[in-house]
Amino acid sequence: MTDDVPPSPAQPPATRLWPTVLGGWALAALVLCLAFAGAIATLRFPDPDDAMRLLEVRDWLGGQSWWDVGQHRLNGGDFAMHWSRLVDLPIAAAMLVLDPFFAPAAANRIAMTVVPLLTLFALMALAADLTRRVSDLERAKLALLLAPLSIPLVYQMRPLRIDHHGWQVVLAMAATTLLVGRPTARNGMLAGFALATLVTISLEGLPVAVAITAVAALAWAWQPSRRAFLVGLATSLFAAAVLLHVVTRGPGMFAAVCDAVSPAWLAMLGVAAVGLSIAPQFGARSLAIRLGALAVAGLACAATLLLVAPECLRGPFATLDPLVYRIWYQNVPEGLPIWRQDAGWAAMTVGFPIVGLIGTGLAWHRAERAAKMRWAILLAILVFASALSLLVMRTGATANALALPGGAWALLAMLERTRRIGPVLVRTLATAGALLVASPGLVAGALFAATPGSASHPSTSMPSLPPCQGVADVRALAQLPASTLFAPIDVTPEIVAMTHHHAIAGGYHRNTDALHRVIAGFTDSPDAAHANIVASGATYLVACPGAIEMDIYRDEAPDGLWARLDRGERFAWLTPVPITGSPVLAWHVNNSSRTPLSGAPVRP
């Protein structure tokens, strides 16, 4: 039994979906460009990682090696990064195409607007295609409508959002779309390549890749005619992962790391490829034997990783020292579970996947035999992705994307009921209600945005000082002569990307010593902080009053350096330096260890 049902004569051909895809995307792109016009004009990034990604691309185009993704303007040039150059490619290509026609600043802005919107186009096209494969053309069009109404998806694919998360969502959707299509070797190989690219971009995509592969294996166990797809996926995933690893890591390909593709992870993928290629040899046996063969393959993969790199089972953040883990990592929202999130973001993240799970489950239950397998495959992947989004918030966008077919199914079911309502006013209200029910994340976002103080956080202890309203405030530090700044972690990417300064640490886990130095500098006693800051080689100490990071330092260490500076105390080894037009504070650091401390309060 094949998994694609050809369109019936009464059904419009699939190609008629593309005008709707293009039109829906063009409208969404226009709305997003208008909504974020101010951010585009001022280059106000959604996240510090977007500023760092821009710097990575500029450094590469400026001559830094393709294989060197380290950031040489941090920590004296010794700042390792685990990022992949694959994400830099479309940004760099857009900049190179635009450079002959626009000034560099304009070319950068256009490139950083176009590239995320292209990921949105890819996502919307895949969502429509996936929905058409499991359902029909009408629901595919509704999936297009729902995609731009998902805040987690829009956040990852809005203008200036040039980090890697959007591409990971697209690649997961591509592999899932291929999995519900015809189970051919070609489709399997394409799915494997998509998953290999996904994990090469960032190993945080490995759980989703494993889930999709596991569902493909279980689908074969239930339906042995899927043998060619499974073997194609497993072998392509391993081969493409090896190829991409060699191409993107070069001389560093043998490094024993746990936070990126490395020989240990490749060994596991190789064992998986062998195991999933051997298992189909039992296709003629019973379902129990097929499941047993898959279990053996899974155990072999786990045993391989345990033997080759047992430390990787602890996760990439296990090497963080206690101070960095407690004050930095435990306050990075995207890596925390849903119950540690702001209520608004939690509702926006899980609302639509719940609708998608309900719709997908009902669609599977009511589907005819030919479509039941496709809905079952999608439901299994969505269940895993939704559960993962409860544990790690940054995976919520993938869950929202995979929920689109089920959400579209549920929306059409509700709309079909509203069409039978007689009175026009009641029918209109019911239709609007159906749209609201089908997009609960958007409703939650609007409600929390309208709630006074819902997005606030504790203000600085010195109400006479204006708080930093955003990381763009630190650009005023360009007034200072080029030097090394001892700055908060969250604003450091903005500083190195948008000014001529160097800094100490950004929020990247491989650099635990640099992270420790910055956190300790703001939370230690003034005497210890003085020695620490001088040892860093920094010329200036920088603070951003009212920023969440600074409030964490103040609350964690009430007698630490920042808490005392925030209360108005001043020290002889720190000379205030005025920064015109910005609430950012800066002090020149006196390098003399003999300079006496003065804890006398000074009126700001």
Image (cartoon, helix red, strand yellow):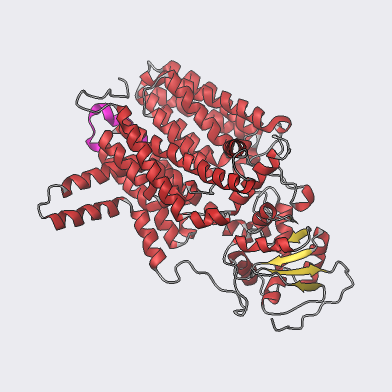
Q: Quadrant of the C terminus?
A: bottom right
Residue 524: image quadrant is: bottom right
In the image, residue 458 lies at what x, y percent?
55, 72
In the image, residue 81 lies at what x, y percent?
68, 44
Compare residues 593 and 478 and report the one nearer the observer. 478
Residue 325: image quadrant is: bottom right
Q: Quadrant of the N terminus?
A: top left
* Magenta span: 365-379
Q: Main secondary structure of the magenta part?
A: helix
In the image, residue 338 lies at what x, y percent?
46, 55
Q: Is residue 155 left or right of residue 475?
A: left
Residue that sits furthest to the front in the current view: 101
Vertical side of 112 occupied by 236: above or below: above
Q: Is residue 366 magenta?
A: yes
Q: Is residue 284 magenta?
A: no
Q: Is residue 314 left or right of residue 254?
A: left
| Residue occupying image coordinates x 66% and y 68% | 584
Q: Is residue 393 left or right of residue 355?
A: right
Vertical side of 74 occupied by 565: above or below: below
| Residue occupying image coordinates x 37% and y 61% | 446
Compare residues 407 and 14 and report the one nearer the observer. 14
